[in-house]
């Protein structure tokens, strides 16, 4: 379609060039007519000049005779209207000649412009014809390549079908592998949770033994540390409710002031996270609803000092 459009465009340009050529021929015809009129006007002017010269000569001759005879005077009077008429004709011929020359000049200018346009169109037409030939050759080459590619296309379709079959089998294997991977990851997460729970239980047990073996003087502070540790374990598994309960219970065993105890909770959590190599987001914890409720209950406690 692209080449047909370009071919159609080239044919339109060729028709425009032919139209301009016809206009040029018309200009040339008009120019020839103008030149003929100019030649005719010149002949008339020369004839009028000759007539005027003869009239003037005759007038001079008649004037010479009038000095000697009344007959010459009458002849002079008879020739004066003819002389005036000749002068009028001469003036008209001169005006006509000037107008013809102006038209001739304008026609020459138009002719030069038309010739320039025609030369440009001819050059463009030659280029268009050359380009059209190239397009035709290229189209023939593409047709030949298209015929050759039909056989290759059949082979490619067979190869694509085989590749798609392999790809479908590979996708099925990939889906099966992904499913197995998800199962494995789930088992690994469950195992990790169980391991973490086991580790936490083991650490709790150690804390319990430390509390049991501690002296009565250190028992209160150990109980405080044990409840803080239980709160940390609950935080680790995402049980913020249990965490808040453990911290609430640790209040009555804390030897510190209320403000110091609240700050000490966060310091302990940060230290535990550092020892285990896990992240700890203080802002996320303190902005939770469980922590806010804990703060309200902690503030309501009248005394955080253990009675002796």
Image (cartoon, helix red, strand yellow):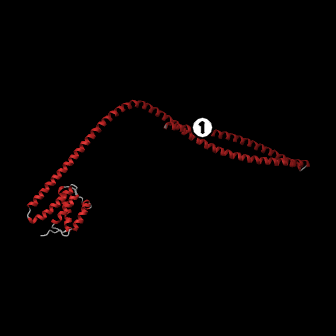
- Quick check: 172 left or right of 92? left
200 w.r.t. 154: above or below: below
In the rendered image, residue 219, in percent from the top left (x then y), is placed at 11, 64
Residue furthest to the right? 70
- Quick check: 302 left or right of 213? right
Q: Nearer the viewer, residue 242 or 58?
A: 242
Q: Nearer the viewer, residue 191 or 31?
A: 191
Q: Nearer the viewer, residue 40 or 232?
A: 232
Q: Secondary structure at mark 1?
A: helix
Mark 1 — residue?
Answer: 18
Task: State the residue at coordinates (23%, 63%).
Answer: 294
- Quick check: 289 left or right of 34? left
Q: Looking at the image, how many numbered discs can be counted on the residues?
A: 1
203 w.r.t. 114: above or below: below
Task: State the residue at coordinates (20%, 59%).
Answer: 243
In the rendered image, residue 151, in percent from the top left (x then y), is placed at 39, 29
Corner quadrant of residue 290: bottom left
In the rendered image, residue 85, in percent from the top left (x then y), is placed at 81, 47
Q: Give the position of the C terminus as an image quadrant.
A: bottom left
Corner quadrant of residue 301: bottom left
Task: State the residue at coordinates (13%, 54%).
Answer: 202
- Quick check: 156 left or right of 86? left
In the rendered image, residue 270, in percent from the top left (x then y), is placed at 20, 60
Q: Residues within 10 Å of mark 1 (few under 14, many from 20)?
A: some
Corner quadrant of residue 256: bottom left
């Amino acid at each position: 379609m692209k080449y047909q459009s370009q071919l159609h465009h080239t044919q339109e340009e060729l028709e425009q060039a032919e139209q301009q050529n016809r206009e040029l021929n018309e200009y040339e015809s008009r120019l020839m007519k103008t030149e003929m009129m100019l030649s005719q006007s010149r002949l008339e002017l020369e004839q009028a000049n000759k007539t005027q010269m003869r009239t003037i000569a005759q007038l001079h001759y008649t004037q010479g005779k009038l000095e000697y005879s009344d007959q010459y005077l009458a002849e002079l009077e008879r020739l004066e209207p003819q002389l005036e008429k000749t002068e009028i004709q001469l003036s008209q011929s001169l005006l006509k000649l000037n107008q013809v020359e102006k038209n001739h000049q304008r026609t020459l200018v138009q002719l030069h412009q038309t010739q320039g346009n025609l030369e440009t169109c001819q050059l463009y037409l030659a280029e268009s014809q050359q380009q059209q030939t190239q397009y035709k050759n290229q189209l023939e080459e593409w047709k030949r390549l298209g015929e050759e590619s039909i056989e290759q296309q059949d082979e490619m379709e067979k190869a694509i079908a085989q590749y798609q079959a392999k790809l479908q089998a590979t996708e099925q294997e990939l889906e099966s592998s992904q499913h197995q991977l998800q199962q494995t990851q789930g088992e690994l997460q469950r195992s990790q949770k169980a391991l973490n729970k086991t580790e936490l239980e083991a650490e709790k047990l150690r804390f319990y033994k430390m509390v049991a073996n501690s002296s009565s003087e250190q028992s209160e502070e150990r109980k405080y540390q044990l409840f803080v540790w239980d709160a940390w374990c609950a935080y680790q598994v995402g049980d913020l409710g249990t965490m808040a309960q453990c911290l609430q219970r640790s209040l009555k065993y804390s030897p510190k002031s209320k403000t110091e105890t609240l700050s000490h909770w966060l310091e302990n959590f940060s230290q535990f996270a550092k020892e285990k190599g896990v992240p700890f987001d203080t802002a996320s914890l303190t902005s939770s609803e469980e922590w806010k409720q804990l703060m309200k209950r902690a503030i309501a406690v009248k005394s955080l000092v253990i009675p002796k």
